[in-house]
Image (cartoon, coloured by chain):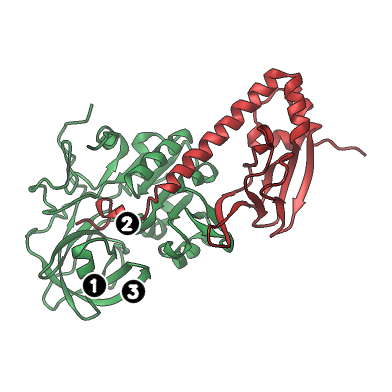
Amino acid sequence: MTTTLEPILRKHPFFDGLTDADYALITGCAKNVRFRKGETLAREGDSADQFFLIREGRVSLDFPAPHGGRVRIQTLDAGEVAGYSWLMPPFVWQFDVVAVTDVRALEMNGGCLRGKCDEDPRLGYTLMQRFSQLMADRLAGTRLQLLDLYGAREESGYSAHE
Amino acid sequence: MSDLSPSPALPFPLQTVAPWKPEPWVIAERKEETAGVFTFFLEPRDGCAPMTFLPGQFNMLYSFGTGESAISHSGDAERSDGRLVHTIRRVGNVTNSLARLREGETLGVRGPFGTAWPMEEMRGRDLVFVAGGIGLAPLRPAIYHALNHRGDYGRITILAGARNPAEVLYPDELDEWGALEGVEVHVTVDRATDTWTRNVGVVTRLIPRAGFSKDNAAALICGPEIMMRYTVAELVKRGVTHDHIHVTMERNMKCAVALCGHCQLGSEFLCKDGPVYSFDRIRFWFEQREC
């Protein structure tokens, strides 16, 4: 028996509100995947032929630290999306994506989806808007992280004022 | 424009009889929390009256010979042993001087001062606590109150952000609270290594995934002002209205009785009119860019 992933795709918040035709079009690019805790979903420098819609569990975006080891930049939970390098040349992963817990996800084939977007620019524009919003949110979050909000400048903030 | 009407009266008559006079309190216990952050458990010296306070209020702690600093209450206002609890971060001369005090030593206490979290007004609502860094300390009395009166509130969500895993404040209590029915706790840090399995990212990113009712939630926020601003924006995206968002604006308190003007923000004396404000009341001044 053949089952379609369309109902699962429809439930994911990132693709919420697409048209029936859109769902039908992109479902063919989706694959159901599972990862065990500690497994790597994608590796920095590898070809970014896909992205992941997280359904269950948590993944992290890790990056090599300047003096060895790995820095965990961000974690993503159910309902979130890992990966946008599939959209832009050179189509290369910028981070490692690692399963922090057991993970269930939909893996979307980037080449397949780019093809659909080329055929249907309206769908392409819709996806571009969503990924632009995703990138803007991530950039805003990263800027706040860079501010070192909870660092030494708290003396003009709260709780202890002199 | 700002609301220039007179500040509302405090919901309780808790201003001290002699607000200028520090009373001697003894450090009964001292606990190291994280690097540079410690907690005093204070008991009144013989003959001194015990103190009552409401969640959100602060005291002026006086390190003799150095000076005073405004420190929020961080203990349970209903605790039966009469101890005052203050969690303090070393940031300047006074708090560094306080940090040198050991158990058995005495410090001066004036207070309590300022407005409280509107716990009565928020009855029946889901509560969303959003804390950044040491901002969890001024929120803790309100969390205790909500847990002590569990039937009065809906779902409780606690979102706590910290710089890194070692600087998460009250980690054991966060775990205890998260294990309670109807209480959801999410902790996130800005920086971590790959051994940290909880959230990484700014605390505002936790808001979309928190399980509160947008139509019936009230939020209490304490942290750096820029963090509070982004938190308010995320809460509004989730449907929480400004009148149900409360922030604490504690800066540069000196006299604590609205005379010296050190804490003045526009028309507001934060030590008396605040530090706890409903966001719709403080919004105008909150959004002004400082020179």
* Chain holding disc 3: B
**In the displayed image of the protein, which residue is found farthest to the bottom?**
B104
Image: B193 above or below B205: below
Three-letter amino acid code at the position of disc 2 = Ala
Which is in the foreground here, disc 3 or disc 2? 2
Callout 2 environment at 10 Å: few (<14), some (14 to 19), or many (20+)? Answer: few
The location of residue B26, given as percent across then percent down, is 19, 76
Q: Earlier in the sequence, mark 1 or mark 3?
A: 3
* Chain holding disc 1: B
Look at mark 3 in the image and give the residue it sits on.
B31
Is residue B67 or residue B104 the one in the foreground?
B67
Q: How many marks?
A: 3
Image: A52 above or below B158: above
Indicate the chain coloured green by its letter. Answer: B
> Where does the N terminus of chain A fall, quadrant-wise?
top right
Look at mark 1 in the image and give the residue it sits on.
B42
Q: Residue at x 65, y 31 (%)?
A: A16
Q: Is the residue under label 1 in contact with that under label 2 (CB below 8 Å)? A: no
The location of residue A68, given as percent across then percent down, is 57, 62
Three-letter amino acid code at the position of disc 1 = Leu
The location of residue B30, given as percent across then percent down, is 30, 75
Mark 2, secondary structure of its residue: helix
Image: A108 above or below B200: above
How far apart, in angstroms, are the residues tagged by discs 1 and 3?
12 Å
Three-letter amino acid code at the position of disc 3 = Lys
How far apart, in angstroms, are the residues tagged by discs 3 and 2?
21 Å
How far apart, in angstroms, are the residues tagged by discs 2 and 1?
26 Å
Quarter of the view holding residue B51: bottom left
Mark 1, secondary structure of its residue: strand
Colour of chain A in the image: red
Look at mark 2 in the image and give the residue it sits on.
A152
